[in-house]
Image (tube, helix red, strand yellow):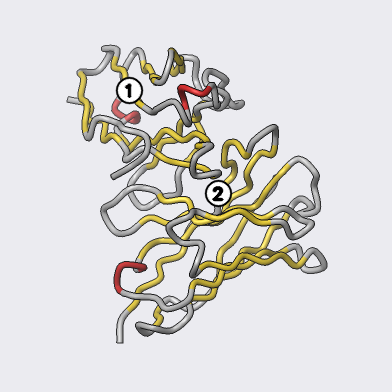
Amino acid sequence: QSVLTQPPSVSGAPGQRVTISCTGSSSNIGAGYDVHWYHQLPGTAPKLLIYGDSNRPSGVPDRLSGSKSGASASLAITGLQAEDEADYYCQSYDSSLSGSVFGGGTKLTVL
Amino acid sequence: QLQLQESGPGLVKPSETLSLTCTVSGGSISSSSYYWGWIRQPPGQGLEWIGSIYYSGSTYYNPSLKSRATISVDTSKNQFSLKLSSVTAADTAVYYCARQRRQLVPNWFDPWGQGTLVTVSS
């Protein structure tokens, strides 16, 4: 049972827009702590996509965007491409646990 | 470009201690802006943060693993290490090391090492 809740899977056709949600509580996202997003291709290490709720590291396309409202955050991907098919994880800080927490992960399938 | 590389035994017997080292290259581990963390991923499952360390040696751990995990740092070798005691099959996972941004609270992990699979089996 992950502290941050993500849907197990989402899917979309090429060119479409998909969103992945990350729901927390008053001790993490709801407390205002930043949310970060990673994607993971099979057999590889996670890679940072979004940091500080909505910031993209250099090299991450602007098709990806992050947002936060209340105790939830979302990752949006527009212009879906086959290469976007991967597992996506959100991460934040939890004051009750005094540490970092991850969501359970969402598998994105490009139809 | 900063790189991290995990090393250590790929097979550990139940009840023994898992030991891994992460070697940092392309940058100094003695930076005031970062923690250095360990994260694991059991086969087919999600990510679990184990703990992180600052170059001064201060640590913080996942409460669920705190009693068994010890993270240490060797600034002279630009390395940090993980020891996990009394392992069981449930500790079988890919173990990643990563740099963690230090701000008001510990923040995002970037970059990550490639990961190393540790199997607990007799």
Q: What residue sits 79% from the left and 57% below the top? A: B56
Secondary element at image label 2:
strand
**Pointer 2: what residue?**
B112
- Percent across and percent down for residue B117 are 40, 66
- Percent across and percent down for residue B46 are 33, 47
Q: What residue sits 77% from the left and 50% below the top? A: B27
**Pointer 1: what residue?**
A21
In the image, B2 versus B53, the foreground residue is B53
Whether label 2 touches label 1, CB < 8 Å: no
Q: Quadrant of residue A87?
A: top left
Identify the image quadrant of the C terminus of chain A.
top left
Between the residue at mark 2 and the residue at mark 1, the CA separation in whole angstroms equals 23 Å
Secondary element at image label 1:
strand
In the image, B70 versus A95, the foreground residue is A95
- A36 relative to B77 in the view: left or right: left
- Percent across and percent down for residue B122 are 30, 87
Task: Using the image, determine if residue B44 lies above or below residue B89.
Answer: above
Q: What residue sits 55% from the left and 26% below the top? A: A34
Same chain assignment for discs 2 and 1: no
In the image, B32 versus A82, the foreground residue is B32
